[in-house]
Image (tube, grey):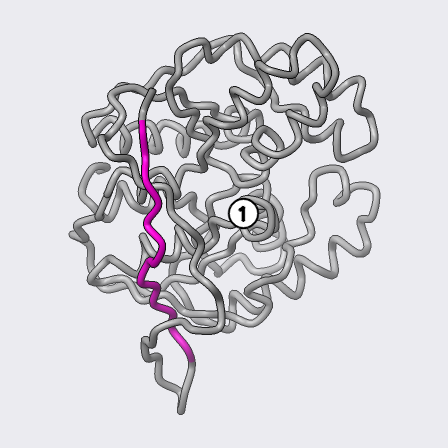
Amino acid sequence: MTHYKQLLKVPILIFTQENGLSRSKKMSAIKPPQITVYDSKPTDVYFFGTCVLDIFMPEAGMDAITLIEQQGIRVHYPMEQSCCGQPAYSSGHPKEAFDVAKAQLDLFPENWPIVVPSGSCGGMMKHHWPTLFKGTEYEQKAIDCANRIIEFTHFLLAIGYKPEDKGEPVKVAVHTSCAARREMNVHLSGWQLIDGMENVERIVHDHESECCGFGGTFSVKQADISGAMVTDKVAALKETGATEIISADCGCMMNIGGKIAKDEPNMPRPKHIASFLLERTGGKA
């Protein structure tokens, strides 16, 4: 078993707007999450790619795997994986969610961390699988998997990854998903990775803590509300003047990117943080 300890305080920097200029200052209003730090870096991990990433943004998944492998860690990608069951679960269909999630349980037999490049899917697997399988023969296996789930940006911090920035100066805006922020409590992980890069300036935007309006089937069932939410989100991102928009959740990237493509063709498209880190550290041409 891989043992780990708790690092209680993580220095976080944010950027605020004052007199038209950006300046960095230590964050005090938000309590930093506890970051799981491994006593020894794991030699192997599983990678659960998520169905959205696999179907719509496979390059981001490959970039995440490359980053992990560059740290000397073997990545195992179970080819039979499909979906965590969250779309059905959050739509009130636990039986269908059970069937989909059950098909994933046997894919992680070794006691290795399960890295998930999405706060939303990670939240489903870590916090809802034990409930979904409670009282069934699969309960203990679900709990075992849940205990090994770790979100991608959190994992990078846990292994002591520090990106060496080789890019030109750039201003970025970051969107963190609701699940990453409120369920997995890892929204500061992505911020810390970005703030640790010498030539990257992160600009805080209005509506920073608000949902983009995706929410899986919510964006279909409540299209008007979803549309209003993503309109506010894109307007706030545009106001920052950032030349890069970064996120760690592909569902949010699809929603925000779709709005940008439709109404703001001159804005940058959202980029997964794995791709951004790989590009900035010279690991991707």
Which region is colored magenta? 3-16
Q: Quadrant of residue 61?
A: top left
Q: Is residue 12 magenta?
A: yes
For mark 1, give the secondary structure: helix
Point out the residue furthest to the bottom here: 19
Q: Quadrant of residue 27?
A: bottom left
113, 173: nearer the viewer: 113
Amino acid carrying mark 1 in the image: Ala
Which residue is tagged 1? 180
Residue shown at 27% from the left, 37% from the top: 159
191, 66: nearer the viewer: 191
Q: Is residue 249 magenta?
A: no
Q: Give the image location of residue 7, x and y in percent.
A: 32, 50
Q: Quadrant of residue 98?
A: top right
Q: If the image is split into quadrants, where does the C terminus sit? A: top left
Report the side of 71 relative to 185 (left or right). left
Q: Give the image location of residue 268, x and y in percent.
A: 45, 56
Residue shown at 70% from the left, 60% from the top: 229
Q: If the image is split into quadrants, where does the N terminus sit? A: top left
Whether residue 53 is situated above or below residue 279 in the rendered picture? above
Report the side of 83 relative to 95 (left or right). left
Total residue callouts: 1
226, 77: nearer the viewer: 77
Q: Give the image location of residue 110, x and y in percent.
A: 40, 11
Report the side of 196 relative to 79 (left or right). left
Residue shown at 70% from the left, 38% from the top: 216
